[in-house]
């Protein structure tokens, strides 16, 4: 029987088929059914191709339907059948396993290979050795990290402390003027400048007598010299007037002012610390090179 589709395509099917209002079903092979939609079939062309009168196609639906073997619908809610395995079912598998083990044992003996127990023992020993080597490596790595971190921390602490001292000395130098000593004379504080290149020692009166010159002794720890000012001073009468040299009168001394922070000493100290700072920086570079050659990680030298 010829079926003409709406696109003009023709399908040859067996003469025995089943027609409904919406489908056409035929058996393509035993147990294999094919269903076509009526909406896709050109009914008039199909009747002409089979030389049938008009309306004969749907008259097949009124006939006794064919007993086409249809596949039974699956019951979705029906429980699946379960099979219980017994030792008898597993007996064949057990025999096959035993035969395989026996064949392996014979082959092992022929090749001189170790037994299964020996192989398992060797595997456990190798695993234990590998674990021991790993633990040793971890311990060595931890020890090396602690060593390099300790050295870097100590050197970094020295550099930080020295930088703080350098900053302090530079601040004092910025705040300290040049060393100019000033001696005040008389009741009205008339200044007479004395300029020294070293810290001025304290002044003491060596000798004081009426009508004589005043000798001022300056203590010098280094040389022990006696320094005398160019002129003596005193008062000739109760009206506090300056007298000339050799007149009767008395003398008095006033404080000797000088800065306690000597610039030369601070500068010398600063230069010494800067030299030490350069040495510490060189030691840090050597430490980095040594750690790199030893295989230390770069992060071990960081804070």
Image: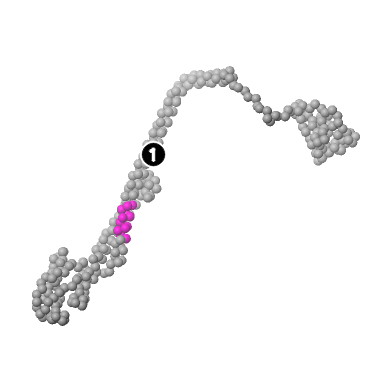
In magenta segment, residue 166: yes
In the rendered view, would you say 249 is above or below 54?
Answer: below
Residue drawn at (24%, 69%), measured in percent from left and top?
179
- Residue that badge 1 annotates: 138
Q: Estimate the x, y position of residue 95 in percent, counting from the top left.
A: 55, 18
Residue drawn at (17%, 67%), measured in percent from left and top?
202
Q: Quadrant of the N terminus?
A: top right
In the rendered view, would you say 263 is above or below 126?
Answer: below
Q: Is there any visible trace of residue 92 in the rendered image?
A: no
Q: Is there any visible trace of residue 141 in the rendered image?
A: yes
Residue 44 location, quadrant: top right
For this orientation, the residue located farthest to the front is 238
In the rendered view, would you say 196 is above or below 83?
Answer: below
In the rendered view, would you say 161 is above or below 28?
Answer: below
Q: Estimate the x, y position of residue 42 in percent, counting from the top left.
A: 83, 38
Q: Tell whether 24 sits left or right of 153.
A: right
Q: Nearer the viewer, residue 210 or 95?
A: 210
Which stretch appears magenta? 156-167
For this orientation, the residue located farthest to the right is 53
């Amino acid at each position: 029987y010829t079926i003409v589709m709406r696109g003009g395509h023709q399908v040859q099917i067996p003469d025995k088929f089943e027609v409904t209002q919406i489908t056409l079903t035929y058996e393509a092979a035993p147990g294999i059914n094919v269903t076509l939609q009526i909406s896709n079939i050109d009914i008039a062309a199909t009747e002409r191709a089979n030389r049938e009168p008009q309306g004969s196609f749907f008259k097949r639906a009124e006939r006794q339907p064919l007993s086409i073997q249809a596949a039974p619908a699956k019951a979705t809610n029906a429980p699946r059948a379960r099979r219980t395995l017994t030792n008898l079912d597993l007996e064949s598998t057990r025999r096959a396993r035993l035969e395989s083990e026996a064949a392996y044992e014979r082959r092992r003996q022929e090749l001189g290979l170790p037994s299964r127990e020996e192989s398992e023992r060797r595997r456990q020993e190798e695993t234990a050795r590998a674990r021991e080597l790993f633990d040793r490596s971890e311990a060595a790595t931890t020890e090396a990290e602690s060593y390099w971190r300790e050295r870097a921390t100590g050197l970094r602490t020295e550099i930080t402390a020295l930088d703080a001292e350098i900053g302090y000395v530079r601040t004092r130098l910025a705040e300290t003027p040049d060393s100019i000593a000033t001696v005040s004379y008389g009741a009205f504080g008339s200044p007479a400048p004395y300029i020294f290149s070293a810290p001025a020692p304290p002044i003491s009166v060596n000798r004081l007598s009426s009508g004589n010159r005043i000798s001022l002794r300056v203590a010098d720890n280094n040389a022990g010299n006696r320094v005398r000012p160019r002129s003596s001073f005193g008062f000739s009468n109760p009206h506090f007037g300056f007298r000339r040299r050799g007149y009767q009168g008395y003398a008095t001394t006033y404080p000797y002012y000088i800065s306690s922070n000597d610039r030369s000493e601070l500068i010398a100290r600063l230069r010494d610390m800067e030299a030490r700072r350069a040495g510490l920086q060189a030691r840090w570079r050597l430490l980095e090179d040594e750690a790199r050659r030893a295989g230390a990680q770069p992060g071990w030298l960081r804070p």
